[in-house]
Amino acid sequence: MATQSTSLFDAGVNARRWIDDYAARAPAHDVLATGSTEPWATMLEELAAVASDDLGHARERVQRHAADIGTGFRIIGEADERPWPVSPVPLLIEAAEWAGIEAGVAQRAELIERVVADLYGEGRLVAEGVLPASLVTGSRLFLRPMVGLEPPGGKHLQFVAFDLARGPTGEWRVLADHLRAPAGAGYALENRLAVGRTLGGLAARLNVQRHAPFFAAFRSGLAALCRRDDPRIGLLTPGRFNPSYPEQAHLARYLGLLLVEGADLAALEGKVYVRTIGGLKRIDALWRRLDPRMLDPLAFDTHSQIGVPGLIDAYAEGNVVLANAPGAAVMEAPAFHAFMPALARAMLGEPLKLPTIATWWCGGADECAHVAANLDRLTIAPAFGHLPLGLTDDASRADLIADMVRRPQDYVGQEEVRLSTMPVVVGDRLEARPFMLRVFAARDGDGQWAVMPGGFGRIGEHPQATVAAIGEGLWSADVCIYGAEPVAPVSLLTAPDSLHVRRNPGTLPSRVADNFYWLGRYLERGEALLGAIRVLLGNSIDADGGGAVLPTATLARLVGMLAGSGAAPSPSSLNRPALIQFARTAMEDPDWHSVAAINRNARAIGEGSRDRLSADMVRLLEAPFPTQRGMLERAGSLQRRYAAIVGLSAEHMVRTSAWRFHDLGRRIERAAAIARAVRLFGMPGATVDDLSTLLDLGDSQISYRQRYPTGLARVAVVDLVALDPNNPRSLGFQTERIASHLAALPVLGDDEMAEAQQAQAIRLKAMVTTADATTLDVDTLGDVESRLVALSEAVARRYFLQGAEPLRAVGLTLA
């Protein structure tokens, strides 16, 4: 196995061997074959220093780093995320070559800005015949309600992306424009982190340009467009089922943006607010990753359930910045590529610095005839980015030709681009694979275009992959811009004395509080259910080969408690086979409220809270269900996982309001479980087996034995499990913590009077604190359970999204 101790000499030998072997097989248009090999040798020396002569190990290592960062993505239609595939070999581009790309990208971004401004403003380009009217109005991407609206700050575009291809002779061309919700900047950042951890010395040896200045420029550019000096900026996400949600969460955390969904926001009186546990808080800018038609059901698609009614009204009044402006995506249509040279001359007075892939829009008679005559040499694509109405996914060539005759304006013909290749690790050697490059540009605080130095590469699976066939690619690659000049160490971290000290992370949206609360409840519910199953397995049926121990009456109550929770249907009998099946259902059947189903719910919350949970916590929540052969072994594995999650939340989560909701959920769930267990196993007439089961369910066996070595006594057991305020598993301890958490959470009024949820918690705490183990009865415990249910509902009404109306109370300050 490779080690860090690989000598520089050995690393150099391995690097040169890899290069010589690769160069002998690489095609003439490969990036390594058309430039100096010295930078590549330096990079491969760094790779050999950690992988020795095992390139497969290098691939595994960088993938492991990507997993540690929490990088993932989802294919549409799939329930589970996939790991983000990162190549250990970055794409190297020399600074002088990159300067040409950078200038071309900035020019194209500015050109598109001016064209979009004209299409939604004066309309001069259509009036003067530079663009056909049908090219604009025939596109679904053209949003007529945005005509005449001046965007806040006067700019439609703040963040754009372009796909580039490098041809056989080294020239770069633009393949596609991404303007609606450009994805991938987070993946470029994560690629850099993963590769940087693998090739630790590469940045210094090659003077690799950093990403941080670009992201800092973008953040300052958004802030500069807002009307307030200290604006609140959010990243508007469609939610955790979006394919690039992990990237969005990573970007929000990295840039210090508030990750919000449409349900988190409310538009009132021409302004936009985020619903928080402390009331409605003004939000000034949204970097949206939501399709523009879904943004506002009052302005666009009336069926949208993920948008914000009234958002466009606030935008029209200049009170909220939307990056990018709705409607800017009209320029994404491939049909516009045919007009980009003419647009550059008309709007900029100069030719394109980065040419566009040759495109013919079939809406013109001559162009349509050219495409028809060259069908076998061109790629036929939808003119406006979506499948024409007259065609289906599995249409034949004859169907395509017939539809092109009916509606030629819906199609374009594009040249097939032959892609350059770059080295990637396949098996244990370097192989040449075609690649495309996605680059990003953003406006800085002065309104100028800043270009990310690099971006990320998409690498095709097959050696001869074309632009049409490469799709999303098989791997992604970090893109390193290197040069002779040293690079200043720039970070998004601020200077030590530049900010005032704060001890909370700021705004907590109600949806996030809701998620943390239910994450706590689900985790506690799963742990309690698992504990009960383990009691059943260990003390009654010993599923791995023993006999029954618990008497029938105790066993029946334990089974009834599990069945009553909905974990499994009541067994037909209490014999060993029936109980084994009952326990298996309660632990593994996803169609019941089993441990597996509870874990699934907790995992879903974890996936939707990536911006606020540590990578370790997310990994534990996403870990697959154990597969050990015996049920006790699987239960034990799950129990250790629960213990690890409890440890992370107890020792690693800062005591913010988010943590309070998480712990509040745990305490309410645990209190209800303990009250139920005491009612079933701790009432007068309880047997020794009942009391021992109660101690097991309350995880208090050791504590009891230390206090009472002489044996089990009902009152002593009930006092320890139900009322002892020093026992972290007791009902008394939970009610004290519940009241403490609610007292620390924000209130809406300034009269210092307890709100409904606080008053209920105080009464519940007093009720349990003044109780006596000798007189504690079924009715009292039943009353405790009912109060806990009512308390949970009061918390939801006050703090969560279903409780939004109280946040609009008369006299409430909207900050």
Image (spheres, grey):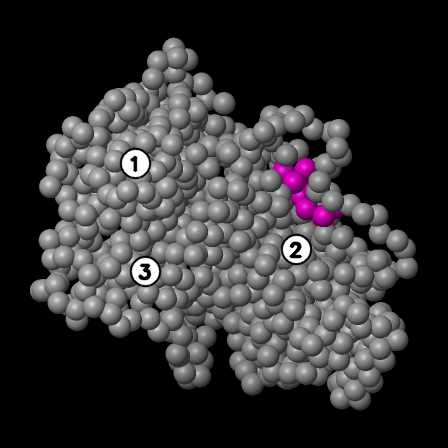
Distance between the alpha carbons at the discs numbered 2 and 3: 34 Å
* Residue that sits furthest to the left in the current view: 572
In the figure, is residue 324 to the left or right of 313?
right
Mark 1: which amino acid? Leu
Seen at 39% across and 79% down, the residue is 395
Residue 361, visible in the rendered structure: no
Q: Which residues are magenta?
A: 212-222
Q: Position of residue 227 (x, y in %)?
A: 60, 27
Left or right placement of residue 229 versus residue 73 in this view: right
Verify whether residue 437 appears in magenta: no
How many numbered marks does the figure carry? Answer: 3
Q: Residues within 10 Å of mark 3 (few under 14, many from 20)?
A: many
Q: Quadrant of residue 321?
A: top right
Look at the numbered disc 2 and give the secondary structure of its residue: helix
Residue where numbered disc 2 is placed: 189
Whole-percent x and y of residue 304? 36, 47
- Say which amino acid is labelled 2: Leu
Q: Is residue 743 above or below residue 593?
A: above
Q: CA distance from mark 1 to mark 3?
A: 31 Å
